[in-house]
Each structure stands twice: as C-alpha cells, then as structure tokens.
Image: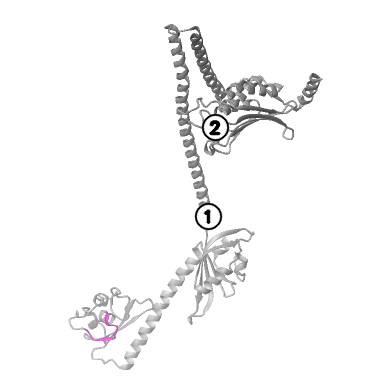
Amino acid sequence: GGRGDLALAATRGLNPGADAELAPDPPGPEALSPASRAAWLGEIQVGHPAGAPSWRFPASIPGLGSDPVVVSVPFAEHEGLPAVLQCFLPAGSELTNEQRALLRWMAAQLATGLRRLRMERRDQLLASYLMGTSEILLELDLDGVVAHANRAAERALDAPPGALLGSRLNDVACDPAAALEAARATGEFSGELRFRRGDGSTFPAEVRLSPAYDRAGALTAMMLVGRDIEERRDREEEISARGAELALMNERLLDANHALEQARRLQNDFLANTSHELRTPLNAVIGFATLLEQQVDASEDERIDFARSIREAAEHLLHVINDLLDLAKAEAGRFQLQLDVADVRPAIRAAAEAIGPIAAAKGLTVEVDVASGPLPAAVDLGRFRQVLLNLLGNAVKFTDRGEVRVRAWLDGRAGTIVVSVEDTGVGIAPDRRAALFGKFAQADPSYTRRQRGTGLGLAISRALVECMGGSIRLESEGSNRGTQVRITLPAALEALAPMAEEAESCES
C-alpha cells in the first residue's frame, strides 16, 4: 500500500487471453482484483472478491474449470517493492495447510530470485562504473594494504596493471595515517591527500575513505574513493593569481587617479599662487608709475622711493618669470649647464653673504661652516649658486627666530661633496615632506598664506642638482622642529691635490 500500482509481470500455464483479464487495479481498500487486495492487506487472499470482474480464461484451460480457486500470496523483495504470487486451483479444491506452506515457500523462492536478479544487475552496474570511472578506487584491508585497485587508480599513479596489489597505502600516498585513523574512529574521512606517482612526483586528490563491514557488522576493509584535483588546483591558483593581478592593477589605477587628482589640485594651487605673485607686483608697478605720471609726488625723495618700488616689483616679476622658464626647461629636459671642476666653497660663502642682509632684517644669523680644504666638484657655479640661494632663501623665509646654518664637507669614503642648509624654523609636517620637491608643491598650498612664493624653488633646485650628477634630500622632525636640506655631489677627487697645492702656494 502506498508504494504504487501493481503490473502483471509474468504468467505460467495460462493462455494469452489471461494477461488482459488478470491486470490488477491499484492497491487500496477499494481494490477488487485478488492480487491488489493481497498486496494492500499483506495477507494471503483465497477466492474471488465479490464485485470483481468475472474471468473467462479459466474455462478454456483443461482441468481448471470456469470457477477456479484463486490464491494470492503477497511478499516483498529486499527494496520494499510489493509483489504477489497468484495461483489457480481447479474448481471445488480446498487449500490445505501443506499447499498453503508450499505457496509461501514458492513466494519466498521468487523473492530470493528477484533479489538475486537485482543484485546481479547492481553488480553489473557497479562493475561498469568501476571499469569506466575516472575516480581512484582502492580497497584496503585493515592494515592499509591494497586488496583491489581499479584501472583509473593505476593510470593516476602511473602503475602497471596489478602492480598496486599488495602495496601499502603509505607507498602510494603521503602521510595517510591520520585519514585512516579518522575513518576508523568516526566512520568516514573526507578531505585531501597527496598521492605519489611511479616517477616520484605527487598530486593532490580529494578522497573519501569509508569502512566496509560484513553481514555480522564487523569491520573488514576500507574503501578509498579519490579524485585528482591537480588541474583544478592549477586553475584555482591561476584564477587567484589573475585576481591578484587585477587587484594590483586596480590599486595602481586608483593610485594613478589619486596622483592625477593631486597633480590637478597642485596645478590649480600653482595657477592661483602664480597669478597672485604676478598680480601683486604688477599692481605696484602700475600704481607707482601712475603716481609718477600724475606728478603727485611731493619731493625728490618720494620719486626715488617710487622708482625703487617699481624696480623691486619688476625684479620680483623677473624672478617669477625666470622660475617659470626654468621649470619649463626642466620639464622638457633642456637644462643646458656648463659644468667645470671648481671649488664650491666660494659659491657657498657668496650665497650666504647675499642672503645675510635679509636674515639680519629678521634678526637671524647665518652661520657658515665649510671644510678648510678644497671641495672640488663638476658644477655650473652660477646654477649652483642659484640652488643655494633658493635653499637659504627658504630657510630665512620660514624661520622667525634662531639661526640659519650652511655646512659643507668632503665625504672621502663615499667620494662626495655634502652641502647642508639647516634652520630652526617652522619645519615640515611628515605628510608634506615627500611632495615638496614636486612642481607646484608648498608646505602651505594656500596662496593667502603668510609667506609668498610660487612653490617652484625646490623642484627647480632638484632638477639642477640632478643635472650636475647629484641628489638633494629634505629632512625635518616635524612642525616647529626646523628643517635640513642636504645636497650631495660627486667629488672631483682627481682635482683635489692640485687645488690643495695651489691653496698652499697662495697662503705662502
């Protein structure tokens, strides 16, 4: 009951017309055919139920008669599907106990036969699967010795036919002890093992290790089913690598976008600052020139003051324009320097002297500490002096009290000339130090800041120093901790001795 309809499977000793008449109706409480009622009730049924269709085929079978005794014996084979053995006895027969027992035995034999047929079919399917599957199948005894291996296992492990029999799992897999122990303890192991091929190479496999029991429930063997996942792992690694590459490219694109955005912002700041730097002295020039034109000056001294103001404003304009031209040359790589081997000490002293009055006006001192001996380097002295004036000017501009110091010495071990400009001023915040040598960069990017400037001095200074084969580096411990800018140039050591001798002769 509840397991589906019955169908006539086979007949013996009946004529062909019986098949159509014996077709059962669905099992259930309303079933009329004897077979369906027996299947539904699970008990032997004797006789023809009332209301069931009459059969015509018995009358045509010799010795059976038109009203035979029908006996329906239900049985179930091993998968639980219902079946019924139905027998017909001559009319007027009585079902004895011996006949009832015989019919039960016949039903049991039929059930056994059906079970055997199903098992044979299952074994054939399993054998076909074992022969055709690409999965690794190993039967192991309780000591881990291979008792059976399919062809797929032999191919995967690069073993000749039959070579795996008798080998231990330790011989074909790396460290399988934990998997075997887990299968014995918990009833199953699912995970990954590495198998060893005949040539010594290994590959990963997903495996399922299950215990096998006999009819008495005793553990007799272990069954290992595995799948080679080397190609899948390679694909996963490739996908992961590509994902990492895409992530890196995305990160680089974000950095590039950030850099472009920062460059755009710096350029906007530069345009605002430069327009301010140009407009202010131009307004002064126009204003003082207008006063001179209108002859509103009261004395000769005022005319001189107006003319001086016009000159100073024009000089400032010229300085800004020169910076812009130098930046354009640096961007185009068209700096043309005249490099000559020279002692850089006079240029350092001259720059310090030039900046001295500006420092004195702020109450600052400029200290010069250079080596006593010559400091020869291949430099363009005019451009080198420009770099020093930029650095010293910045030091004085951003220092309100204390001092500005310029030091220079020969680093004989590194073969370099080192020039250091140090101040006790406002210093540089850590997040601004790395960007200060970029074009348009300033410690305070707002053009309304207290100190004036286009922010090109350090960018131009770096380009000039690099054209002379050197490097420039800025260091600061933070805001209000002062700043140190260090220039390093290759020393012309071959000119050191002649310069020293010349200096001694001049002193004598």
User: In the rendered view, would you say 401 is above or below 200?
Assistant: above
- If you read the primary sequence from the N terminus, does the residue marked by circle 2 or circle 1 appear first? 1
User: In the rendered view, would you say 447 is above or below 72?
Assistant: above
Residue 176 left/right relative to 408: left
Asked if labels 1 and 2 touch by Cβ distance under 8 angstroms, the answer is no
The reply to whether the magenta stretch includes residue 272 is no
Q: Which residue is mark 1?
A: 233
Magenta-colored span: 40-48
The kind of residue on which mark 1 rests is Arg
Q: Which residue is mark 2?
A: 436
Considering depth in this image, is 13 or 210 the residue closer to the camera? 210
Q: Quadrant of residue 384?
A: top right
User: In the rendered view, would you say 128 is above or below 28?
Assistant: above
The local secondary structure at tag 1 comes to: helix
Give the Cα distance between marks 2 and 1: 48 Å
Q: Position of residue 264 (x, y in %)?
A: 46, 30
Residue 211 left/right relative to 76: right
Residue 420 left/right relative to 128: right
**Marker disc for residue 275:** none
Q: Position of residue 221 (x, y in %)?
A: 54, 75
Considering depth in this image, is 166 or 371 the residue closer to the camera? 371
Considering depth in this image, is 196 or 39 the residue closer to the camera? 196
Q: Is residue 504 visible?
A: yes
Residue 118 left/right relative to 23: right
Q: Quadrant of residue 204?
A: bottom right
